Image (cartoon, rainbow, N blue to C red):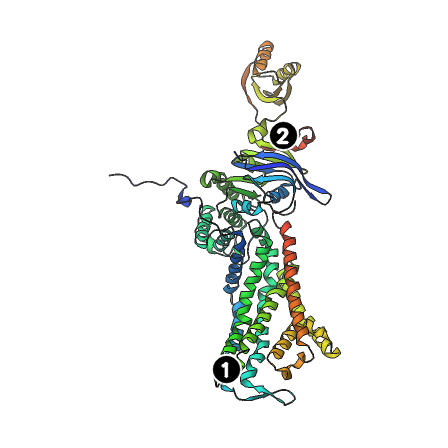
């Protein structure tokens, strides 16, 4: 089966500056978070995938090479830019109709789909008003609608919740979350906002200094802690004593509270080790569970110790 | 009795949604969409296009009226020499008014065209789709050509046909028949100048007001200076003034050299070359600037 996005040794240079450096990955999923700090190369990657800029290596979207099939890809991909990209004096309906026609749809079909996309994005009656007078939240909705209007198979969303108040942000994320199911399209969500990724994404790509540091599912991202597995152990009393005996057994521990300790067990050990050592020390265990790392913590870990852990495709 | 079906919550906006499976307009014809949008958006407001169109229509009515009512009246030049009849002079003398209307449209639409898109970030809107830079350039320029031809070509053509209608016999009809291609030629030159040169200025600056000011300064101030220099030095430099060049070509084409006025010293061939070079260079500039902006147009900087 063809991967949504396949990168092979993808490199982009601007003179002496390497914006993206030998990216290798096969990316699939419903909502893929493209993460990275400023200057990581996210926008350059998006431009390369849209076939807008030349590059070295290979970049395939929906099985089509972006270098040679850029126009075909752009007919099948919707792009919601981060910055404002409106046509002055146009209403939302006019702009979305125009967008659909530019993507090749006949005028009548384009108009129908413009109305449908704007309804979906929640603009309703406001869609007849000129965009120049819209609030930031409404403009974001128009950008989403114009990206959707030509019925794309993949949506590239660049910072879709930027500048939104908490309620609008929540509504926008709800719309994004529903899209794969209701419109049958995959989403690549480029963002700095890690809680957004945590809420809606099932896969992630993490870039840093032009390199791909991680590519895989969110669960893999959270679980990718080298050879250790972290668990949270709750005891009736004296978590410090339990920590001390587990450290002797080769585990890494840190106290979360007087009655709980986070434990990274050696690769060969299981939870049985914790129970056994606690029993021997006369400590009562009240609970034990997997300690899930937040996406934010995982992101910081991936970009923080990145030289030691290069991503594997 | 069967209860009425209840729509699932949250599906109202997606009723009837189906993936589009029909044919799409081929990539080579997307410029037509750009052109149509250019025309329809220009037509929307009074001050951008319709006011200049009204001036062109008024010119046609006045020149047509003069042609009809005062058809046999002899027209003299400043030196008092009989130069032509009013019927024959009305069309060429009206060209400068069409040129003025053309300049108005070039200022309100042409000089804003690319600058407006650069300013509003519309390049991202265009180039994230399967619109190529050449589709954008051709669509925008052809849109301008259609709009400008309504100003610069339609009026002269109507006047030329009216003049044919005033012919007293078939021999005269044949004699003045070349007025039609001449009117079309002048209309075409005016259309090309005002559909391309201001757009080139607009592609140089991503600020609408500055682009308009730059084009107005070039056409009016620079034009006036080079025209004055040309007259003082009796040299070719005056052909750099587009307005005077169009005047010189029109009066030469319609055999009214005695009316040349400030275009008197200009050679029509040199004026024609100047006009064509302006148009050619303008198209090259627009193409280059759009292509340059295209690469950086999507996704911001990385």
Residue at the farthest left position: B1
Secondary structure of residue under mark 2: loop
Instruction: Please give the name of the residue rendered at 63% of the width and 38% of the height, measured from the top-left corner.
Output: A36
Quadrant for the C terminus of chain A, please.
Answer: top right
Residue A192 in view, yes or no: no
Residue at the farthest right position: B233
Q: Quadrant of residue B275?
A: bottom right
Nearest the viewer among A107 and B30 is B30
Depicted A284 relative to depicted B161: above or below: above
- What is the number of the mark on residue B173? 1
Nearest the viewer among B200 and B216 is B200
Depicted A168 relative to depicted A257: above or below: below
Nearest the viewer among A181 and B247 is B247
The image shows a total of numbered marks equal to 2
Instruction: Please give the name of the residue rendered at 64% of the width and 84% of the height, measured from the top-left corner.
Output: B258
Judge depth for marks 2 and 1 and give the one in front: 1
Q: Residues within 10 Å of mark 2 (few under 14, many from 20)?
A: few
């Amino acid at each position: 089966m063809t991967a949504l996005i396949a990168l092979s040794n993808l490199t982009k240079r601007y003179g002496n500056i390497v914006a993206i450096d030998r990216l290798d990955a096969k990316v699939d999923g419903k909502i893929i978070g493209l993460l990275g700090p400023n200057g990581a190369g996210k926008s350059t990657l998006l431009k390369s995938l849209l076939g807008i800029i030349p590059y070295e290596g290979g970049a395939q979207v929906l099985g089509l090479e972006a270098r040679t099939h850029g126009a075909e890809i752009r007919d099948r991909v919707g792009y919601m830019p981060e910055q404002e990209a409106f046509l002055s004096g146009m209403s939302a309906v006019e702009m979305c109709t125009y967008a659909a026609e530019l993507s090749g749809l006949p005028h009548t079909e384009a108009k129908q789909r413009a109305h449908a996309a704007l309804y979906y994005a929640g603009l309703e009656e406001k869609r007849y008003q000129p965009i120049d007078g819209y609030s930031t939240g409404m403009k974001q909705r128009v950008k989403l609608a114009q990206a959707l209007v030509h019925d794309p198979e993949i949506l590239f969303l660049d910072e879709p919740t930027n500048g939104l108040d908490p309620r609008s942000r929540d509504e926008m994320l709800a719309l994004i979350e529903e899209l794969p199911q209701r419109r049958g399209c995959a989403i690549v969500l480029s963002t700095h906002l890690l809680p957004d990724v945590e809420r809606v994404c099932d896969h992630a790509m993490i870039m840093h200094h032009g390199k791909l540091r991680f590519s895989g599912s969110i669960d893999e991202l959270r679980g990718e802690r080298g050879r250790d597995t972290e668990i949270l152990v709750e005891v009736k009393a004296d978590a410090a004593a339990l920590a001390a005996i587990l450290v002797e057994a080769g585990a890494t521990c840190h106290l979360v509270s007087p009655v709980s300790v986070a434990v990274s067990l050696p690769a060969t050990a299981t939870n049985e080790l914790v129970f056994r050592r606690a029993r021997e020390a006369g400590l009562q265990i009240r609970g034990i569970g997997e300690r899930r790392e937040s996406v934010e913590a995982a992101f910081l870990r991936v970009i923080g110790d990145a030289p030691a852990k290069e991503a594997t495709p | 009795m069967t209860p009425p079906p209840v729509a699932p919550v949250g599906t109202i906006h997606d009723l009837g949604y189906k993936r589009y499976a029909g044919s799409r307009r081929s990539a080579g014809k997307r410029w037509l969409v750009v052109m149509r949008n250019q025309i329809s958006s220009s037509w929307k407001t009074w001050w951008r296009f319709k006011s200049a169109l009204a001036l062109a229509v008024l010119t046609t009515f006045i020149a047509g009226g003069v042609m009809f009512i005062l058809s046999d009246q002899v027209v003299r030049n400043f030196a008092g020499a009989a130069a032509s009849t009013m019927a024959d002079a009305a069309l060429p003398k009206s060209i400068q008014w069409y040129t003025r209307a053309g300049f108005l449209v070039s200022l309100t639409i042409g000089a804003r065209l690319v600058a407006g898109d650069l300013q509003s970030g519309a390049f991202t809107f265009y180039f994230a789709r399967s619109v190529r830079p050449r589709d954008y350039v051709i669509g925008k320029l052809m849109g301008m050509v259609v709009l400008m031809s309504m100003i610069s070509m339609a009026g002269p053509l109507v006047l030329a046909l009216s003049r044919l209608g005033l012919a007293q016999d078939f021999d005269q009809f044949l004699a003045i028949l070349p007025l039609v291609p001449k009117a079309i030629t002048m209309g075409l030159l005016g259309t090309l100048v005002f559909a391309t040169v201001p757009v080139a200025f607009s592609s140089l600056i991503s600020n609408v007001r500055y682009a308009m000011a730059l084009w107005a300064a070039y056409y009016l101030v620079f034009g006036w200076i080079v025209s004055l220099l040309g007259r003082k030095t009796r040299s070719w430099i005056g052909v750099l003034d587009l307005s005077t060049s169009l005047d010189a070509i029109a009066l030469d084409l319609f055999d009214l050299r005695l009316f040349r006025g400030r275009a008197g010293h200009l050679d029509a061939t040199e004026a024609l070359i100047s006009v064509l070079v302006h148009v050619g260079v303008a198209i090259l500039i627009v193409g280059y600037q759009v292509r340059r902006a295209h690469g950086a147009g999507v996704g911001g900087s990385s």
